[in-house]
Image (cartoon, coloured by chain):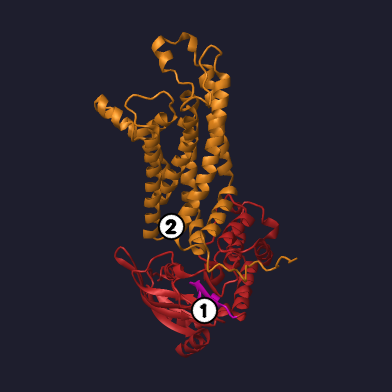
Chain colours: A orange, B red
């Protein structure tokens, strides 16, 4: 039977120095102890589940034309809340980084952990885990609430049908990937307002820039813009001109990785 | 032990720090003195690895800051009054930093008690007065029981009781054998706490001396001449401002 040491130090610590686990624990404690984290996750949940109920209870399947009935996708329509939800978790990702710069906390963080890419990696791991958990829980809840709200006469989706489980899982993963894009953008831009504008620009404004182009260019562009990509990922009935959902998912993961890599470079290159 | 060797940092055209070399030894409080804008904060940030020098290097116990294995256990720093998220409580702030360097809850509680903020530990730090913010900063600096401390203008904005507390703390830390580097633009403040002095102006080393030596020099300048007199003579011509009533 050993007794706990009273020293705060792991004096006889076998570790040769701080490691990823130590830094991840710091980042988890940071994320957990600011209220805005839980506010944003709570609003995200309300948006995801609430909008699914609103959308599917007002689907009006009985009044749809034959063509609209054929295109009716009771799974995809549950995730209309992603329009708002992606913004909330994207903003959370931005804030995880930019509030450190605005408050001066970043100097305390880098004094404790001078290897800056390790700090960003730990933030990404913790933020990714929290937002993925929130995303998946809310995606499954939105799906269940949506199906329950759908008129009895309309076709319902079940998780056992082909492509449905994939669509729901990807609906949960998508906002977590946007959160990581937000984190990388925050590390690159450093200012909250600027970084959030950049994320909003990519999510909402960038797709609009393709409006003047021909239909074929517009259709092709949809495969590369995050928000239209989310539509393709959460659709069970294949969308015209869309790449496969898995390919789009892989592409979005690459976007997140690129944003984090750019953020890590910027953190290292610039003075804190 | 802190060693700075030929540190240079330029912002656009102006050199904030210009070929600065000095040493800070254990067991002493070393005052880092210079007029506003002399480059004190920039130098401390370079020692901490926060700013990258354009030339030269700073080492702590022979190692660059970025190569320290447990940075908080080797160096503690108070570089600004409020280096914390305003929405986080004092205890949560310290617990987060402690985690990064494998420091336990017990030590966090000890530091809250040492700095006298344990009653406010569960309040959001953004609501703290300047004095309490400084105490939280000191608690963070001492978390890892480090042998080297860097304090940038720690008495700025404090009330007399807070100033006396910091002075006694710094002397106590040096008496325990730690190397303490404390910056100030007030020579009179240094007279209370520092043994050794590093005086800089416009980023350049003007003198590495002791309070006693500088004081003795002051007495030779004019009858009843003081430390202050000697300091003004040293820094004459290196301030970025001038003025007078006449």
The CA span between labels 1 and 2 is 33 Å
Residue A5 x, y percent position in the rendering: 70, 67
Q: Is residue A61 left or right of residue B108?
A: left
Is residue B182 in the magenta section?
Answer: yes
- Would residue A234 be seen by someone viewing this image from the given angle? yes
Q: Secondary structure at mark 1?
A: strand
Q: What residue is rendered at 41% in x and 70% in y? A: B39
- Look at mark 1 in the image and give the residue it sits on: B30
Q: Quadrant of the C terminus of chain B?
A: bottom left
Badge 2 density bin: few <14, some 14–19, many ≥20, Cα 10 Å:
some
Most foreground residue, A75 or B94: A75
Most foreground residue, B164 or B72: B72
Q: Residue A171, relative to residue A5: is it above or below?
A: above
Q: What residue is rendered at 49% in x and 39% in y? A: A89
- Look at mark 2 in the image and give the residue it sits on: A117
Q: Residue furthest left?
A: A214
Q: Residue furthest right?
A: A1
- Would residue B82 be seen by someone viewing this image from the given angle? no
Most foreground residue, A55 or B170: A55
Is residue B226 in the magenta section?
Answer: no
Q: What residue is rendered at 58% in x and 69% in y? A: A14
Residue A213, image quadrant: top left
Q: Residue A168, relative to residue B215: is it above or below?
A: above
- Magenta stretch in the rendered image: B177-190
Check the residue under mark 1 and report the chain it is in: B
| Numbered circles on residues, count | 2
């Amino acid at each position: 039977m050993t007794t706990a040491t009273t020293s705060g130090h792991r004096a006889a610590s076998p570790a040769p120095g701080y490691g990823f686990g130590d830094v991840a624990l710091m980042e988890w404690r940071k994320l957990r102890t600011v209220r805005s984290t839980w506010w944003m996750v709570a609003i995200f949940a309300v948006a995801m589940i609430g909008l699914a109920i609103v959308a599917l209870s007002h689907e009006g399947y009985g009044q749809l034309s034959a063509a609209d009935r054929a295109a009716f996708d009771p799974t995809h329509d549950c995730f209309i809340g992603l329009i708002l939800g992606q913004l909330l978790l994207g903003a959370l990702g931005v804030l995880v980084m930019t509030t450190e710069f605005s408050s001066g906390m970043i100097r305390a963080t880098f004094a404790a952990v001078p290897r800056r890419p390790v700090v960003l990696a730990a933030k990404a791991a913790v933020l990714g885990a929290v937002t993925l958990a929130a995303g998946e829980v809310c995606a499954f809840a939105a799906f269940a609430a949506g199906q329950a709200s759908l008129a009895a006469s309309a076709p319902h989706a079940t998780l056992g049908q082909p492509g449905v489980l994939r669509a729901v899982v990807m609906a949960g993963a998508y906002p977590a990937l946007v959160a990581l894009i937000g984190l990388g953008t925050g590390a690159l831009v450093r200012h909250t307002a600027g970084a959030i504008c950049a994320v909003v620009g990519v999510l909402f404004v960038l797709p609009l820039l393709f409006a003047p182009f021909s239909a074929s260019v517009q259709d092709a562009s949809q495969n590369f813009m995050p928000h239209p990509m989310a539509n393709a990922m959460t659709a069970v009935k294949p969308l015209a001109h869309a790449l496969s959902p898995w390919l789009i998912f892989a592409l979005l993961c690459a976007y997140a990785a690129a944003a984090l890599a750019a953020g890590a470079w910027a953190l290292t290159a610039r003075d804190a | 032990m802190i060693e700075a060797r030929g540190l240079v940092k330029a912002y656009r055209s102006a050199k904030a720090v210009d070929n600065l070399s000095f040493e800070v030894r254990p067991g002493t409080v070393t005052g880092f003195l210079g007029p506003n804008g002399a480059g004190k904060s920039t130098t401390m940030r370079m020692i901490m690895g926060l700013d990258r020098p354009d030339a030269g290097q700073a080492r702590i116990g022979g190692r660059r800051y970025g190569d320290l294995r447990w940075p908080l256990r080797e160096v503690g720093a108070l570089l600004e009054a409020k280096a914390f998220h305003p929405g986080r409580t004092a205890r949560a702030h310290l617990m987060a930093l402690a985690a990064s360097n494998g420091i336990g809850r017990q030590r966090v509680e000890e530091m809250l008690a040492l700095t006298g903020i344990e009653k406010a530990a569960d309040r959001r730090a953004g609501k703290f007065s300047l004095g309490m913010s400084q105490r939280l900063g000191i608690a963070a600096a001492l978390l890892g029981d480090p042998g080297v401390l860097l304090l940038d203008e720690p008495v700025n904005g404090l009330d007399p009781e807070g100033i006396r507390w910091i002075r006694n703390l710094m002397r106590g830390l040096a008496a325990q054998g730690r190397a303490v580097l404390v910056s100030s633009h007030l020579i009179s403040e240094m007279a209370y706490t520092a043994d050794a002095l590093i005086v800089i102006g416009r980023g350049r080393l003007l003198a590495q001396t002791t309070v006693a030596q500088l004081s003795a020099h002051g007495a030779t300048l004019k009858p009843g001449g003081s430390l202050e007199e000697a300091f003004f003579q040293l820094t004459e011509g290196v301030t970025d401002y001038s003025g007078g009533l006449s």
